[in-house]
Amino acid sequence: MNKPFLIRDLEANTYRENFFVAAIVTIFIIRIFLQLTDYPQLGLGDLHIAHILWGGLFMLTAIIILLSFLNKSAASIAAVLGGIGFGTFIDELGKVITKENDYFFQPTIAYIYITFVLLYLISRLIPRYRPISQKEYLVNAIELVKESAINDFDQEEEKRARDYLKNCPPNDPHVKAVKTLLANIDALPVAKPNALVLMRMLLSKWYHDVAYSDLIFKVVIIVLGFQIIRTIAQTISILRIRPELSFGEWGQFSASLLAACFLLMGFLTFRLSRVGAYRFFRVAVLISLFLTDFFAFMDPSWFDIVSIIGNVFILQVINYAQTEEKRKKKR
């Protein structure tokens, strides 16, 4: 087997997801709390305990947990605490990058947004930057077996471990040892999920049923068509009136125009190749997420937050439609 320097955790997607959710929710909670309480000062006299310090404390706690404990529950707790810490830390970005320590520095939200976009792209790259090695499959199978010494080992975990071992050389002594351990462990039926997990499963099922329904797909296509019409109308208005636009407004308009061009190409190729059309649609939505919404966050509003959520939802629908179309062609 080859020996990779870094061994990827094939179960880590949940940790990364919890980290991002915790960080984003923390930023929203802090901003709303500060606005409702008129930005109180924590400290006495000239002392002010900025919440960037609390962010560092949460991240330090997450690191200590990861360095001190071996089980997956510790990793789950560390992911949430790390997300809370990072959200608390980066919320004060304006103070760090300005000479005046200006928390209200206008482009801060845009910088925070692009930071999360880059982190998301990096997190997507980690599982894909190279094929999963045999060593990684083996180590992940061992990790699943290790959990059996800590918690109950259910049939679903046993199946995942055996699937990982199928990608390992059968004559390797480590593989044989893990298979022997699996054969001697009585896997329990999959445990009934607790209330929190059950709620998450129900929400996931509801989201899947909604996002991947034919009706929603038609609505998404109509929305994408409306975006083209809106961009054309906006372009005509700018050419006629020639208003003085700020840098952020020019960036937002230019990105919207580029996205509209890809949308138009998608509609023009829809009858010839749906897969090709979905590819154009996907690029357009990504441009909206990474560029249009970035410039919009130079002067953010609640509508811009709704726009981001909407674009993420549309991207999921387009990805699903593209995957289904490819499956149809393979049949």
Image (cartoon, helix red, strand yellow):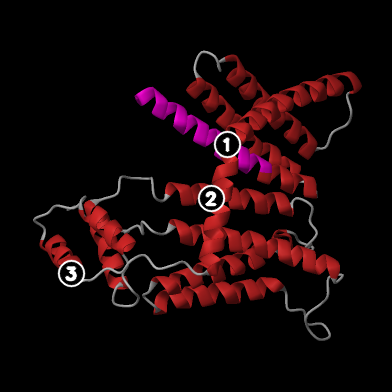
Q: Is residue 71 above or below residue 284?
A: below
| Image coords of residue 171 (percent x, y) | 8, 56
**Outermost residue, bottom direction?**
44
The residue under label 2 is which amino acid type? Lys
Q: Is residue 75 magenta?
A: no
Calculate the distance from the C-alpha at mark 2 to the C-alpha at mark 3: 35 Å
> Which residue is rendered at x = 57% and y = 36% of the image?
213
The residue under label 3 is which amino acid type? Leu
Mark identifier at residue 181:
3
Q: Main secondary structure of the magenta part?
A: helix
> Which residue is rendered at x = 30% and y = 63% of the image?
155
Residue bearing mark 1 = 213
Question: Badge 1 local density, few (<14 within 10 Å), some, or many (20+)?
Answer: few
- Examine the image and state in which quarter residue 11 appears: bottom left
Q: Which residues are magenta?
A: 310-331
Mark found first going from the N terminus, 2 or 1:
2
User: Can I make out residue 122 in this image?
Assistant: yes
| Image coords of residue 27 (percent x, y) | 69, 62
